[in-house]
């Protein structure tokens, strides 16, 4: 059983960071119930058993606009430690399921809220996505090679790092505090703020004069020849991160390059050309065979479909049939994927029965819930 065994969480269905946070909690052993919409298709990017982020939890289909459906959610809230939702500010209040209403039924409940811009402020009600949140957080603008547009780092930074992961941390922290105080609270997880927080080190480096405002000229943004991605003869790539002097020296030796003073910044562009010329002489896998077993901090750049087959990932069991394995690892209470992703509403009756709801048939007859009976 995972370290969160015994913790109960209600997840109001959403897309992106909300499901990711719920997946993390479920992987760590929490009993998470996903509340999907009843009687209709949702966003195709969010719902369905294809979505690995829905693993580890059951789904109940509830009509939140139905009076009996809303009351059912409040009854479930009486039995849970936390609720997480990802609507725009004010939506849950208009549904009659806002934090004050829920707290009246369960003062100990932690109410986790996932938004892009936060619960207040001039942009709180504006639509956006990961790329917008990292843009105004200053993170997107710090990326990129000199003279090029900022790259798009998938939607990893705001949705999952600065969003879902910090929401999960906030919920766990507040649940822990509630067990001492007897009082729940609202966790306002905004992806702009989470993304900004992830960039704390770069703000510190800039304040210390160690980071230039010109992208592509710094230590970690492709400016340094020893922290760069190089093309190989077969069209593949090798990632180099030889920051420390001893690793840089090992890299030079393995590449059979003459000494190039690591911190002679004026010559970094010249050194990058030398590195590029050498890496272009062999295939990606040839370089991997030569470099990955050495302390040169150089590895092959793998595609999504290749990563599960890398020998290290195989040995560690890093990937499963339902996506990457739970992380981090615990020595005594291991995290685990308890069940595959469920279709919306697949477990309505079983979930409600397990949570002590006895009038399921009446709720189904009224149209407040749906899914297989």
Image (cartoon, grey):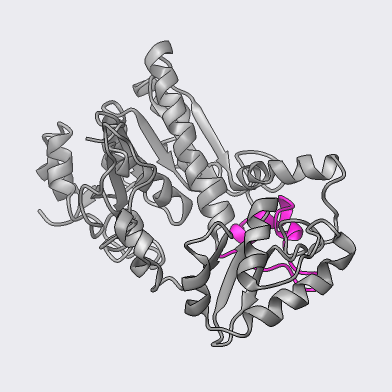
Q: Main secondary structure of the magenta part?
A: loop
Q: Residue at x 49, y 39 (%)?
A: 167
Q: Position of residue 259 (x, y in %)?
A: 77, 65
Q: Position of residue 325 (x, y in %)?
A: 33, 53
Q: Foreground: 188 or 171? A: 171
Q: Is residue 262 left or right of residue 297?
A: right
Give the magenta part as a residue range: 127-154
Residue 235 lies, with reference to residue 77, above or below; the image says: below
Q: Foreground: 120 or 6? A: 6
Q: Foreground: 217 or 77? A: 217
Q: Is residue 346 left or right of residue 189?
A: left
Residue 253 lies, with reference to residue 12, above or below; the image says: below
Q: The N terminus is located in which quarter?
A: top left
Q: Residue furthest right?
A: 266
Q: Position of residue 157 (x, y in %)?
A: 58, 54
Residue 88 showing in the rendered view = no
């Amino acid at each position: 059983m995972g370290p969160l065994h015994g913790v109960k969480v209600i997840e109001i269905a959403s897309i992106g960071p909300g499901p990711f946070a719920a997946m993390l909690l479920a992987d760590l052993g929490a009993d998470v119930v996903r509340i999907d919409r009843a009687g209709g298709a949702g966003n195709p990017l969010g719902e369905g058993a294809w979505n690995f982020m829905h693993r580890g939890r059951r789904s109940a289909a509830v009509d939140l606009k139905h009076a009996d459906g809303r009351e059912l959610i409040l009854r479930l809230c009486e039995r849970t430690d936390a609720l997480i939702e990802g609507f725009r500010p004010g939506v849950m209040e208009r549904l009659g399921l806002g934090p004050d209403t829920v707290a009246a039924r369960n003062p100990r409940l932690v109410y986790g809220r996932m938004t892009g811009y936060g619960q207040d402020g001039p942009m709180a009600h504006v639509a956006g996505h990961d790329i917008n949140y990292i843009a105004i957080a200053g993170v997107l603008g710090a990326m990129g090679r000199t003279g090029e547009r900022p790259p798009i780092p998938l939607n990893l930074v705001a949705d999952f790092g600065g969003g879902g992961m910090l929401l999960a941390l906030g919920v766990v922290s507040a649940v822990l505090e509630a067990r001492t105080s007897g009082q729940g609270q609202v966790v306002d997880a905004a992806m702009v703020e989470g993304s900004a927080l992830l960039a704390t080190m770069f703000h510190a480096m800039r304040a210390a004069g160690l980071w230039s405002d010109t992208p592509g000229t710094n230590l970690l943004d492709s400016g340094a020849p020893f922290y760069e991605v190089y093309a190989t003869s077969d069209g593949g790539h090798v990632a180099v991160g030889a920051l420390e002097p001893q690793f840089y020296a090992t890299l030079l030796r393995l590449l059979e390059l003459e000494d190039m003073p690591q911190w002679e910044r004026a010559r970094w562009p010249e050194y990058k050309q030398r590195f590029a010329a050498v890496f272009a002489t062999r295939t990606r896998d040839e370089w991997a065979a030569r470099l990955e077993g050495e302390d040169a901090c150089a590895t092959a750049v793998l595609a999504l479909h290749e990563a599960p087959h890398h020998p290290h990932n195989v040995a560690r069991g890093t990937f499963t049939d339902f996506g990457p394995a739970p992380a981090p690892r615990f020595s005594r209470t291991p995290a685990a994927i308890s069940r595959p992703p469920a279709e919306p509403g697949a477990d309505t009756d079983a979930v409600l029965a397990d949570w002590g709801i006895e009038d399921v048939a009446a709720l189904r007859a009224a149209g407040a819930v749906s899914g297989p009976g």
